[in-house]
Image (cartoon, coloured by chain):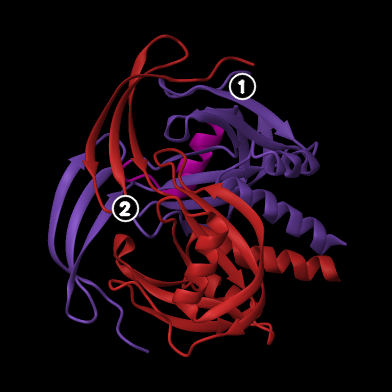
Chain colours: A purple, B red
Amino acid sequence: MSKLEEKTLKSEEIFSGKIISLHLQEVELPNGKTSKREIIKHPGAVAILAVTPENKIIMVEQYRKAIERTIVEIPAGKLEKGEEPDACARRELEEETGYVCESLELLTSFFTSPGFADEIVHVYLAKGLTKKEDSAALDEDEFVNLEELTLEEALQYVKEQKIYDAKTIYAVQYLQLQEALKK
Amino acid sequence: MSKLEEKTLKSEEIFSGKIISLHLQEVELPNGKTSKREIIKHPGAVAILAVTPENKIIMVEQYRKAIERTIVEIPAGKLEKGEEPDACARRELEEETGYVCESLELLTSFFTSPGFADEIVHVYLAKGLTKKEDSAALDEDEFVNLEELTLEEALQYVKEQKIYDAKTIYAVQYLQLQEALKK
């Protein structure tokens, strides 16, 4: 197996924002030549697959400026500085949906776009849900509509591209797999 | 259902690179206040789930500078300007693995990071595979090792975080679901 690593020769921060930063790197390739890499740094995020006692998946409809449209997603949010992923998952679930959970199980973690970004998403399954508040406590620039979907409705949303992002499509397929394994 | 859309008040291009560009936008929120959005534009990509007649999943091991490590992924690549996703999928499969396919089925498309990027990945299932060449024809700054994994090996790779990205974890779970549905 050949050596694949790319050595950083130079790294320049082009932009540092509220959420992401952009770095332009010059790297040495395995063959000794050099190339440029455009890299986004992101604090990482959590997402929560939460199914109510009535067997409904809790979703949030949210406008996503990057894609100029609303999509329906499982609740999710960015890690605060120094925050543990499971603490972040509890916080985001409660803030976005008003639900609290007894326990969390980590289903998987994945890099969303390893070609250009270091963003990782930790996907949790929330267990023992109870509705704590009527209204959610969102960030001041965050606006969402809650939806509770059966698995069949969620699959229909995937087909209609109302559900259209990696973490939510993964989560819906995870539930589909659990259903299939039960039979 | 409340109106969620965010209106662009101002958009500034901070950086335009080989692969991504970064835009800083000022938006009007649904409540009339303003906020900033940091947005990455990306040409979009395809990924190919290709299973050989021997029932092995074709994977590529690749160093990803953004995460400073190698991971094992299904073959994938960026869309060229004006290129149709299915043509791109055929091209990338052949370039990265030396396999050609008779037909392609679109399994799903998803936005990888709708919170800050417009990157979409189209995931195809390749059917009727034949090995065309011994060596792949990679881009000049691209170095990969081919691996062919059984589903069980792929699941083990997910557990060991050798497989660690959204599209590949989705693809492995897709095969797991097909197996479960067969029984």
Residue B51, picture quadrant: bottom right
> Nearest the camera: A12 or B81?
B81
Q: Is residue B100 visible from the viewing direction of this image?
A: yes
Q: Position of residue A125 (x, y in %)?
A: 62, 49
Q: Residue at x 81, y 60 (%)?
A: A180
Q: Chain of mark 1?
A: A
> Nearest the camera: B45 or B167?
B45
Which type of secondary structure does the marked residue at label 1 adopt?
A: loop
Residue B61, picture quadrant: bottom left
Which labelled disc corresponds to residue A93? none
Q: Which residue is mark 1?
A: A133
Tags 2 and 1 touching, CB below 8 Å: no
**Overall secondary structure of the magenta stretch?**
helix
Which type of secondary structure does the marked residue at label 2 adopt?
A: loop
| Three-letter amino acid code at the position of disc 1 | Glu
Does residue B99 belong to the magenta stretch? Answer: no
How far apart, in angstroms, are the residues tagged by discs 2 and 1? 44 Å
Crowd band around label 2 with a 10 angstrom C-alpha radius: few (<14), some (14–19), many (20+): some
Q: Position of residue B57 (x, y in %)?
A: 60, 78
**Residue that extends furthest to the top in the rendered view of this protein:** B32
Q: Position of residue B63 (x, y in %)?
A: 34, 72
Q: Residue at x 86, y 71 (%)?
A: B183
Q: Residue at x 56, y 63 (%)?
A: B169
> Nearest the camera: B104 or B113?
B104
Q: Position of residue A42 (x, y in %)?
A: 33, 47
Q: Chain of mark 2?
A: B
| Three-letter amino acid code at the position of disc 2 | Ile
Q: Which residues lie in the magenta part?
A: A81-94
| Residue B62 sits above or below residue B109 on the image | below
